[in-house]
Amino acid sequence: MHVLFVAPEFPAYQKQFVRALKTVGARVTGIGEAPAGYLSDDLKGWLDGYEQVPSVCDEGAVYEAVRRVQGRGWVDRLEATIESHILPIAKVREATSIPGLSVKTAILCRDKPEMKAFLREAGVPCALSDAVSSPEEAAAFIEAVGYPVILKPRAAAGASGTWRADDAAGLARALQDLGVDRGNSAAIEEFIEGHEGFHDTLAVDGEVVHEFISHYYPGVLSAMRDRAISPQIISTNRLDAPGYDSVKRLGRKVIKSMGIGTAATHMEWFAGPKGLKFSEIGARPPGVGQWDLYCAGNDLDLYVEWAHALVHGRPLRQASRRFASGIVALRPDRDGRIVGYEGVDLLQSALGEWVIDAHLPPAGTPTQPIEAGYMANAWVRLRHPNYDTLREMLDLVGRTLKVRAA
């Protein structure tokens, strides 16, 4: 099989997908923005060809690159794994008659109001939502639903650009930030109180062959707004517990309804007083290195599992569920440059055997804004056979390991 893989060089983990495709016997041609000479030696060794384009989101440029490759031989798949690439690559895929995720499904995955409207019609419980392009439309939605509400870009990923409005003043600030007061269109939805988590899958012809369920502590919006919080993401190894049955059923219903065939998915959900509510889906792997946590917790190379599903139509092995695994993000105590750490000895003295890896940028490194995400600054990843013990260990790291900046 010949697979075209988009953006093999950036971010750094992208090359793992190329490695995996090569491991399972595929021929791989990369389409990326960096000059070929800038590619790492290992990536060059895995690629059978490379096409440089000005931007992988430039549909015309990518179309021409694909046509050049097709002019030299058959192409079986055109794959992208980054949220912002999914829709433009789906359009090129359709224009060049290559099988894979459709433009219709890609649009539904990117446009939050369209996604929720489609899924509600399919019987999937979602928050009430709409698209608004003026303060008057936002006011009409709130008249029907009430405060608080969540506002975000229609194609947002994670908590990027997301606002919670509890009153008219908060709404005005959100509308101004999103440009709705100037005619931009944004997503608005009712605020769903409850615990927040996500359900990641690998599907083959619409059937789930691998799945993982993870939890946010606290929810993403809170985590990205408060420097004092050391937020966690934990992947459970208790997927057979009865409480997860409804999450798994909901995920399968969404995959079927959206017409997703062979692909990775990332699905967010809330569980609270209003029951289990579906939040959103991306037809791609999760971010923040989450697949690495799944690999570490399950004696599995999930990149190879993904590649084997694409190339051979089936998984290689099943997840062991031997460990729960998680990450705790460590925020600098202020913006500036890192000057040092306190409590690092804890990692070896108390938790050594359970540490997967850690990222502690050296003194002098500029800090990143906390809203840049869980891996923007320092972080530690751990695993343990007992989920509750893992939570306690991650709490301990968050309380003890401090990042000092000046």
Image: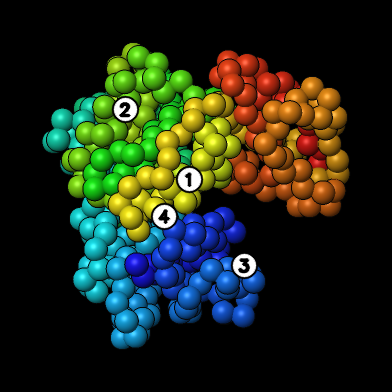
* Residue tagged 2: 248
Q: Position of residue 250 (x, y in %)?
A: 27, 29
Element carrying mark 2: helix
The reply to whether discs 3 and 4 touch (Cβ–Cβ < 8 Å) is no
Q: Is residue 166 above or below residue 291?
A: above
Of the image marks 4 and 2, the number of the one nearer the N terminus: 2
In the image, residue 87 above or below residue 216: below
Judged from the image, the secondary structure of the residue bearing numbered disc 3 is: helix
Between the residue at mark 1 and the residue at mark 3, the CA separation in whole angstroms equals 19 Å
Q: Which residue is mark 1?
A: 302
As measured in the structure, the alpha-carbon distance from the residue carrying label 2 to the one carrying label 3 is 37 Å
Numbered disc in front, either 1 or 2:
1
Q: Secondary structure at mark 1?
A: helix
Nearer to us: label 4 or label 2: 4
Q: At 73% across and 28% down in the image, what residue appears?
A: 353
User: What residue type is disc 1 on?
Assistant: Leu
Q: Residue at x 25, y 68 (%)?
A: 98
Q: Residues within 10 Å of mark 2 (few under 14, many from 20)?
A: some
Residue topped by disc 4: 307
- Residue ID at (26%, 27%): 249
Which disc number belongs to residue 42?
3
Image-based side of 353 in relation to 18, left or right: right
Q: Nearer the viewer, residue 144 or 257?
A: 257
Q: Earlier in the sequence, mark 4 or mark 1?
A: 1
Indicate the quadrant containing the N terminus: top left, top right, bottom left or bottom right.
bottom left
- Earlier residue among tags 2 and 3: 3
Q: Residue furthest left?
A: 121
Amino acid type of the residue tagged 3 in the rendering: Asp
Sequence order check, earlier mark of 1 and 3 = 3
x and y percent of residue 35 in the render? 57, 79
The three-letter code of the residue at mark 4 reads Ala
Of labels 1 and 2, earlier in sequence is 2
